[in-house]
Image (cartoon, coloured by chain):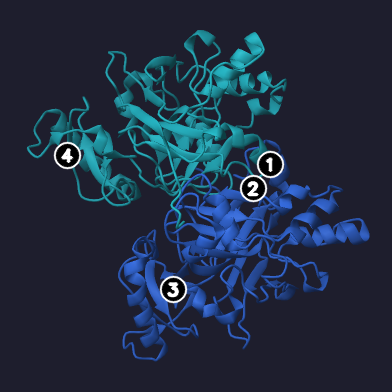
Chain colours: A blue, B cyan
Amino acid sequence: MKLASLKSGRDGELALVSRDLTRAFALPGTLQTALDHWAEVEPKLTALAAALDEDNVAKAAPFDVMQCAAPLPRAYQWIDGSAYLVHVELVRKSRGAEMPPSYRNDPLIYQGGSENFLGATEPVPIADESWGVDFEAEIAVVTDDVPMGVTADAARGHIKLVMLANDVSLRNLISAELAKGFGFLQSKSWTSFSPVAVTPDELGDAWNGGSIDLPLITTLNGTLFGQPNARTGMVFDFPQLIAHAAKTRPLGAGTVIGSGTVANEDRSTGSSCIVERRAIEVIETGSPKTPFLKFGDQMRMEMLDRDGRSIFGAIDQTITRYTPSPLS
Amino acid sequence: MKLASLKSGRDGELALVSRDLTRAFALPGTLQTALDHWAEVEPKLTALAAALDEDNVAKAAPFDVMQCAAPLPRAYQWIDGSAYLVHVELVRKSRGAEMPPSYRNDPLIYQGGSENFLGATEPVPIADESWGVDFEAEIAVVTDDVPMGVTADAARGHIKLVMLANDVSLRNLISAELAKGFGFLQSKSWTSFSPVAVTPDELGDAWNGGSIDLPLITTLNGTLFGQPNARTGMVFDFPQLIAHAAKTRPLGAGTVIGSGTVANEDRSTGSSCIVERRAIEVIETGSPKTPFLKFGDQMRMEMLDRDGRSIFGAIDQTITRYTPSPLS
């Protein structure tokens, strides 16, 4: 089944969306409330979704991605991994640094801000272009309640929804912020999600319980930027990321976990963020060529199934200039 | 006015508490919902609080801190500063490191986990004593909607509630985690809050819009551990912390911001966490004496007004052993 949150108030209005993303059916409540009671709610939603796909829901309306907030317009938790180590290796290599061998055993994950997610087509407001604005195309999953100390094996069963994410990163603020040692705060400002979140069964045999064997396609201003496979090179799969995050505490229903920027060893697949392409340019030519995002630039992320149909709908966003109010 | 969330479901049941913390009156809804509509809700709550303090609310019941969840049992955001630089300086000095001068201009703040806060008297479940379990006694504030790019001056008006926090820290996991560069995840497992959150007017002239001119009293197993003044040595006040956090994004209603461990230059006031006392022991005697917390240890944090009355009620928690279920 596919779920969206139509724009309404702070938490949106839960909607079932047909598999072909053409029709939607609004339901009472929010996605967070559904996740809070997933075991009871899921069978009912599944039955309704089947009826919707068979065109047996009279009240279904055309599905309009412009009406979509993020599936969780605000969440209680967003933790984002960096599971594609080739991305980490490239970025470090471009500045002459080796990747510590421990990175192969101990996943990099940061605690991100979750209280203001952007919908798939909402503009990204940025006050200052010189911050070095970049996108990061990722896969994200949503869990139900995960007990503290969960094993990776048991964590598989806690993945309830899958979506795409665009983790907007302010590259020119990152080094100084990370040097302080407390992780990202100002340098990770916005995160956006695909129009719909889907249950893992919608991925068919492309889902193995931990990662997706399909390319994630990113375009920048209409030109292909990257299409790496989302399984290839994922050194820590989602169950491993969940087990790492839950080592010292439980994770509540509606926790969103990101994969980090999708990247493959095969450079012909392109990149899922600008900083990685710049790193490759530095390695290959000695200097970066591709600029970071400017106001008006448009980025698009989408994943197609093996028959070429969009699974999650597309993230399709433009960078816009934000001017603080004189009163703020 | 003073507000609590009585234990009920995931988000608690909002309650008004009398100024003297003896009586409470449950209200429909949750504290998050009240914060989402604060401008409309606040005048009504204030009127009810006045009636409660005059003993004119028939349905008021005795207030029982054991029934308290955290004022926000889960929140959409928890960001925690380290505003008392003497604490940072001591901890660094004990390991022979200087504090970078930039720390005086650029606040240290980390994005923390917010989806599972503990109530003031709830036990703190820990799987492994060898993680080096420590408390951190802090002040925390709750905001309404804060616009991106807010100035520190304008941020003052966005502080709606004040409370105490215990930021449980796993000291023996911190160095390795921070060395990875992505901040805290496993090493900050639980955060607990005082029984009630209060509007700033409840602090009287001890509140100047940015900090509290009163000691924060911490005891460990019944023995005084520290009572530093919460204004003295707070290098960045709450409006400055808020402005820093809102530089590149807005902060949503119900954002919780912590001060970091309260500490004074005057060592006779003691410490608000064990690691700082250990740092002083290293500086003064060459080695640490005070052990980290063991199962069964009990920590208590409270702040009294100038007449000796408890403002927030006490955080009073015990460390308990957590054993993961064989099925997880």
User: Which residue in the protein does label 2 denote?
Assistant: A187
Q: CA distance from mark 1 to mark 3?
A: 36 Å
- Which residue is painted at 87% across and 57% down in the image? A282
Give the mark nearest the N terminus, 2 or 1.
1
A46 or A57: nearer the viewer: A46
In three-dimensional space, the C-alpha distance between marks 2 and 3, rounded to whole angstroms, equals: 30 Å
Residue wearing tag 3: A3
Q: Residues within 10 Å of mark 2 (few under 14, many from 20)?
A: many
Between discs 1 and 3, the one toward the N terminus = 3
Same-chain status of marks 2 and 1: yes
The residue indicated by pointer 1 is: A178
> Which amino acid type is shown beneath numbered disc 1?
Leu
Q: Are marks 1 and 3 in contact (CB under 8 Å)?
A: no
Residue A180's place in the image compared with B205, above or below, is below
Pointers 2 and 1 in contact (CB under 8 A)?
yes
Which of labels 2 and 3 is toward the front?
A: 3
Discs 4/2, front: 4
Crowding at mark 4 (Cα within 10 Å: few <14, some 14-19, many 20+)? many
**Is B173 on the left or on the right of B48, as rendered?**
right
Badge 2 element: loop
Question: Does residue B49 appear to the left or right of A190 in the view shown?
Answer: left
Give the numbered dot on residue B25: 4
* Mark 2 touches mark 3? (CB < 8 Å): no
Label 3 marks which chain's residue? A
* Drawn side of residue B119 relative to residue B267, left or right: left
Name the amino acid, label 4.
Phe
Q: Chain of mark 2?
A: A
Q: Nearer the viewer, residue A52 or B36?
A: A52
